[in-house]
Amino acid sequence: MKKILSSVFFIIYSVLGALSQDMHFSQFYETPSLVNPALTGSTHVMRASIIYKDQWGSVTVPYRTYGAAYEMKFKASSWDKTDPFKSKSYKKAFNRLAGGLAFFSDKAGDGNMGTNIVNLSLATFIKTGEFSSLSVGLQGGIIQKSVDYNKFVFSNQYNGTGYDKTPAAGEDYGTHTFITPDVSAGVLWRYEKEEEVIGENNQLNADVGFAMYHINKPTQRFIAGTSDQLFSKYNAHGRLLIGIPHSSIGIAPSFLMSFQGKQKEIVIGLMAKYYLKHESKYTGFVKRTSVGLGVYYRNMDAMIVQLMLEMGQYAVGFSYDLNVSGLTTVSTLRGGPEITIRFNSANRFLFQKK
């Protein structure tokens, strides 16, 4: 009986909460368009990724969320030729504009409550120092939501021994699906100082930003006669990568704080990276390879364990949520897995042209 009551509570809470809370991923920095539009193009000339999350399969109908994203700086090369008569005379360029396209989809609960999002992002970069820059991002998108009312059962359909869907539910439904526009914006400060000598491992990278999502507060119409608005969401985030000099270890703490209506989400943690290979600074023939192990905490919800393998231009990340909320009686710590695959352009080697 305790398990049944916990499951019923979870379904009701999830269906109602889905109206006011956005989809989220544990590997949040792998989905930059959901964290801050100003992150678009901030780390690589080109970046493409896919991500998939499966959660709550131990409690109810699994919630499945996935997405794909592509972003690029509009100036392809990170180096400018300084002398047209010399083949190897370059200086580091500063790319000032980037754009991105992202798609995310989510299916939740017994009613197949679905959310599809398409985001188009644009960011511009302003140099603030030798190693630092400020970026401003704007994002326009479309949100499509749907629900299958035929999947629900109500108290008047209970005949004493079981549920009979033949009688009408007597509920005044709204539309099964609707589409609304969405507008978001953000700012980001970034500091990036790479190692000066191969293998010295003294790089220092950092960023901190703030973003506001659903500035226009899109209208939602799941119930007939209502026009509830989606709450605006406020994100504050930051991360740091510190190389321990003359070692093969890097430390990367990060955090994300999200506030949306009465909902809040705070994720904080740290990843330790071990570098198996150091990249070639001048030719680019040897790519950096690292293995990362991270532990994060999402407030009042889950402990997150993450494994990240980066091999030059490719990266594969896997994480698992260990549920530590009030649902542990039913979930027995099982939250769900998440996997991401990323491809990005090579780092800014001296003679890179493409």
Image (cartoon, grey):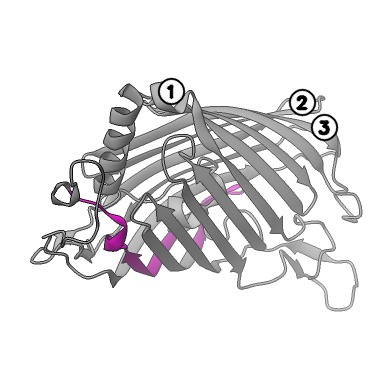
- Write the residue at 33% across / 65% down: 145
Tag 1 and tag 3, C-beta contact below 8 Å: no
Give how far across and how far down residue 242 sits, in percent.
65, 31
Mark 2 surroundings within 10 Å by alpha-carbon count, few (fewer than 14), some (14 through 19), many (20 or more): some
Give how far across and how far down residue 313 sits, in percent.
77, 54
Of marks 1 and 3, the one in the foreground: 1
- Res. 36 visible in picture: no
- Write the residue at 38% across / 60% down: 114
Residue 112 lies in what quarter of the image? Answer: bottom left
- Res. 143 visible in picture: yes
Mark 2 residue type = Pro
Residue denoted by label 3 = 200
Task: Identify the disc placed on residue 245.
Answer: 2
Which secondary structure dominates the residues rendered in magenta? Answer: strand
Look at the picture and state if 49 lies above or below 24.
below
- Given residues 326 and 24, the one toward you in this image is 326
Look at the numbered disc 2 and give the secondary structure of its residue.
loop
Q: Earlier in the sequence, mark 1 or mark 3?
A: 3
- For residue 250, side relative to residue 232 (left or right): right
Q: Earlier in the sequence, mark 2 or mark 1?
A: 2
Tag 2 and tag 3, C-beta contact below 8 Å: yes
Considering the image in quadrants, where does the C terminus appear? bottom right
Look at the picture and state if 37 lies above or below 120.
above
Give how far across and how far down residue 340 sits, in percent.
63, 49
- Given residues 281 and 336, the one toward you in this image is 336
- For residue 39, side relative to residue 310 (left or right): left
Question: Is 174 included in the stretch rendered in magenta?
Answer: no
* Label 2 – label 3 distance at C-alpha: 6 Å
- Given residues 150 and 85, the one toward you in this image is 150
Mark 1 surroundings within 10 Å by alpha-carbon count, few (fewer than 14), some (14 through 19), many (20 or more): many
Residue denoted by label 1 = 324
Look at the numbered disc 1 and give the secondary structure of its residue.
loop
